Image: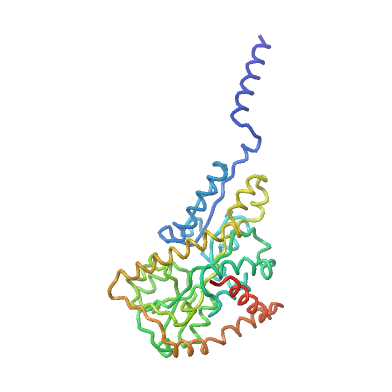
Amino acid sequence: MKKVVFAALAAASISASALVPDVARSQDVTLRVHTFMPPVANPYKHFLVPWADKIGKDSKGRINVQLYPAMQLGGKAPQLLQQVRDGVVDIVWTLPGFTPGVMVKDEVFELPFIHRDTRSSVMALQDFADIHLKKELEPYHPLLLHVHAGSLFMTKGAIHRIEDFKGMKIRSPSRTGTWVIEALGGSGLQLPLPELAPMLTKGTVDGAILTYEIAPAVKMQELTDYFTTLSGSQPRMATTVFAFLMNKAKYNSLPPDLKKVIDANSGRNLAPFAIKVWDMIDADGLKVMHTKSKNKFVALNAAETARFKKTVAPVAERFKEEVNKMGGDGAKVIADAEALVAKYAK
């Protein structure tokens, strides 16, 4: 009788093992992705959601990516870099500029007139990270550093001359943006995106440095009236650097085959998708801004653009000093960024 029971148990064990052909099958993984971005925003819908779906598909369901937008797991946007570093969450998608002083050298791409277009800046940033950002990125497992298509001024009042900036309170996503606004005679406020719409409604701020792709999420087509760019080959003043980062210990804990899935969907493998997405959603956002007949789209003329460049030139010098204080070479950081963007420019 004991032999019969033993045989039955052995058969059941063999049958169960057939359902799990590889020991690694039991090593399924859940990755929690935390971001400040609201779920209605284009970057969330067109970048993070498809990325999560692809990871699930490529891993044959073994990696379950759970997205938590709008800081649903707690904390504030400036804390995201620490959250992923400390393992509070597995992955974050954020702006390093929300946490000044943590990743400084990447801010060079946010300086006026470094950026030309999405492709050249994103590709340049991949090379730049290999050269200049190893120390800053060491606490993380980087999935991607990238930028958007370029920012402009979205304001309630008209801007036709440099003097029009005087006294304006303008939100910026980065400290370099606030330096630009201050150089122009305005007041720069570095605020997380969710705070922008309420402040515009109350009149606490007069506008923002923003890009078209995110503008519909905060109803800039309704809350502002003027959309101002520059003239010439670089009409978008600058761009903003985004960081898609994974907890290093979490990545290292993955079995080799799942690491390959992550690697195939990060870095230079992911950059072309980011470029495509941000060009697409920028164009889509511009269309939304055009849905309100009250909105006016202005490009500063050549003379005012030249004055603009001269007026904000001290911002680059200020950045150099910041890098030099950290023991780096600010002039080289700027020169390398400019050369790499030129290398990939259309």
Residue 290 seen from this side: yes
Residue 104 seen from this side: no
How is the protein colored in the picture? Answer: rainbow
Residue reaching furthest to the left? 293
Q: Is residue 137 above or below residue 295?
A: above
State the residue at coordinates (60%, 62%): 82
Residue reaching furthest to the top? 1
Q: Position of residue 289 (x, y in %)?
A: 35, 70
Q: Is residue 46 above or below residue 342?
A: above
State the residue at coordinates (50%, 72%): 173
Residue reaching furthest to the front? 346
Q: Position of residue 190 (x, y in %)?
A: 49, 75
Instruction: Please give left or right for residue 105 compared with residue 237 in the image.
Output: right
Q: Nearer the viewer, residue 20 or 182?
A: 20
Q: Nearer the viewer, residue 346 or 74?
A: 346
State the residue at coordinates (43%, 76%): 208
Q: Quadrant of residue 344?
A: bottom right
Q: Quadrant of residue 105?
A: bottom right
Instruction: Please give left or right for residue 144 compared with residue 152 in the image.
Output: right
Q: Position of residue 207 (x, y in %)?
A: 40, 77
Quadrant of the frame with the N terminus: top right
Q: Position of residue 204 (x, y in %)?
A: 39, 77
Q: How many marks?
A: 0
